[in-house]
Amino acid sequence: MATETTAAPRRIARLPLVLVTSLGVAVAVTILAVWAGGGADTAVPGIPGAGALTTWGLSVARTVSNASAVATIGALLLVAVLLPGGRRLGPAQLRYLNWAAMSAVLWAFAAAATLVLTLADLFAQPVGEIASPAVVADFITTDAQGRSYALMTAVAGLVATLCVGIGRASWARLALLLALAGLLPPAFTGHSSAAGNHDAAVVSLALHLLGVAVWVGGLVFVLVVAARREKQAAAAVRRFSPLAGWALLAVAASGLVNAAVRLPSPGDVFTSRYGLIMLAKAVALVLLGGIGQWHRSRTIPALNDSKRRAFVRLAAGELLLMAAAMGLAVGLARTPAPGAGDASLSPTAELLGFEMPPPLGDFPWTPLFTQWHFDPLFAFGTAAAALLYLAGVRKLRARGDKWPVGRTVSWLLGLTVTVLATMSGLAVYGKVMFSVHMGQHMILAMTVPILLVLGAPATLALRALPAAPKGEPDGPREILMRLLHSRYVKVVSHPVVASVLFIGSAFAVYYTSLFETLMRSHLGHLFMLVHFLAVGLLFFWVVIGIDPGPRRPPHLGRLFTLILTMPFHSWFSISLMSSTALIGEGWWSLLDRPWIADAADAMDDQYNAGSIAWATGDIPVLITTIILAVQWVRSDQREARRIDRQIDRGDDRDPLAAYNAYLASLHARDRRPANSRTSEES
């Protein structure tokens, strides 16, 4: 017993050493990767350079910024997701919230240092000569990289401030979302944003960063709670294990896409410095995947039996390997990619991420089916949605439960149409022609949602996910049920709110400067597409949805919602056709479109956009009305069968029997003599 008691403090004492060593490994590997990749060879003969402080300090600052950001996210992930608890944070959660605050402070300082050193690197001047407040402020306001690092610094400072004063789990989840968002701005302004297919490059890099942050940060803090022998360590590790698997999958898939975009040919993997460092990262990823599998098969079951030593040792080694991989990633960011200095990209390709497509020509508009553009977010998102849905259906059938085939077909068809709308010629021409963009908008907002809500994914999840044992923390099923009946969902699923969001967002996007602003940005364009899909899902879930919710309006109310909303859609379409001002003129003027020669052609295209919005709106409304009528009839039939069963059982609670008894009592009362009624009343 004494041996075990002394061993625990010894392992706790070693924990800071493991964490500091991991950071040291990350910095050392970064310096080595920058040197090996040629990232330090930035001086041009005859021109003064930025100096060694900038060359090496920038890489170190990025490494420290990344490591502290990962630590912040890991601590918040532990507090908000992994450690069991209620609405108010417990003592252990509050303790690790302080860890998150300290790492967020370090993150803010490292991000600020990265901002200043990036300025010195871009202008090839020593830090002492250029880092004046006026120059830094001008860099932030005029340069995308300056704004991205300034935003990261601000988010880190905000997260640090939040972590000091919060005591509820909801605020911890908000801080976690802010920290994850703070990682993303540099992804949209770095090397990937200048790649030929920059849409795929920046989105895959963003997914890569999120996956790494969740994976590495989560591992750091499950290692911490296991080494410190927290009571809820086993539960935290069990929750983290599937999350780590999905993070590994996201990191591997997004890394593969980013490599395909950045490397001109597969042979560059073995013949260029950039490719060799990327290959080293891939080897580290494979090793980490093997360690994760070892965890799931050996150390996690042992941890459940209170045998923590094997898990702590293997996790410490895994953390050192992850630190080396992070160092390689920073070195890779400083290494010139093959063909990085090639100026062969046209202004259109730099703006769009691809060359201007050929004219559509006359019907049948063949290029819409031959021009494809890969989008990692929708590709990975739809693939994951399909696999998870099919896994749920398989689980139901394995235990003998039925699931309607029509729902599965509807869900898969909806995902297929989503892929067509976001990666086919509709996505390519949607960036260069307003009419095609409007068709893409209508498909995402009015066709895909009908198919997806009829798939009833939430109902499937509630039936397939296991219920948490009594006395255990809430699992995914309980979290989903709580979300479906939350106050937020209750507000947004109100028919009036859903209708205003569905119609009002179209007017807000197209009749303000928002459309032009969103089209100029990769992230903005992506946000616009996701928003159209989200408001469409919300509206059609209210009207014809099968999944449970905090309020399910009666069928007559749903019909009124549909009837009252659609005239506003027609009004929007007519206003587009009759408008005399070109919507998004600043964006269209940047494009060299041979088939749109002047403003008259652009206005004709806008008129066609209004016509498409009007025509494509009527068919989904008709289909929705038919579906709603069928659901109404089936609901009445189910209610009639239920009442019949109650009558057959002789159930006293049958509403029809109770009403008949009430009428009989009134009839008996009316037949009584008048004097007896008078005496009763007196």
Image: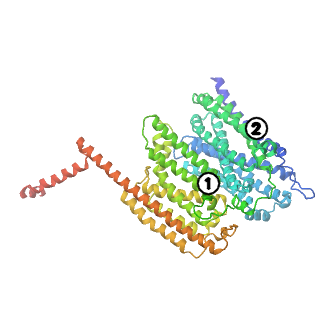
Q: Which of marks 2 and 1 is in front?
A: 1
Q: Which residue lies under the disc numbered 2?
A: 21
- Residue 665 against residue 570 in the figure, above or below: above
The N terminus - image quarter: top right
| Residue closest to the eye, 204 or 107 | 204
- Examine the image and state in which quarter residue 434 appears: bottom right
Report helix, strand or loop for mark 1: helix
| Residue closest to the eye, 592 or 62 | 592
**Mark 2 burial class by Cα count in 10 Å: few <14, some 14-19, many 20+:** some
Q: Looking at numbered disc 1 in the image, what kind of residue is underneath it?
A: Met
Q: In this view, does 44 lie to the left or right of 122?
A: right
Q: In this view, does 565 lie to the left or right of 516?
A: left
Asked if residue 16 can be seen in this view, the reply is no
The C terminus - image quarter: bottom left
* C-alpha distance separating marks 2 and 1: 44 Å
Q: Assess whether mark 1 and mark 2 are in contact (beta carbons under 8 angstroms).
A: no
- Examine the image and state in which quarter residue 373 appears: bottom right
Which color mode does the image show?
A: rainbow
Q: Which residue lies under the disc numbered 1?
A: 423
Where residue 597 sits in the image (x, y, percent)?
Answer: 67, 72
| Residue closest to the eye, 369 or 128 | 369
Where residue 665 sits in the image (x, y, percent)?
Answer: 15, 52
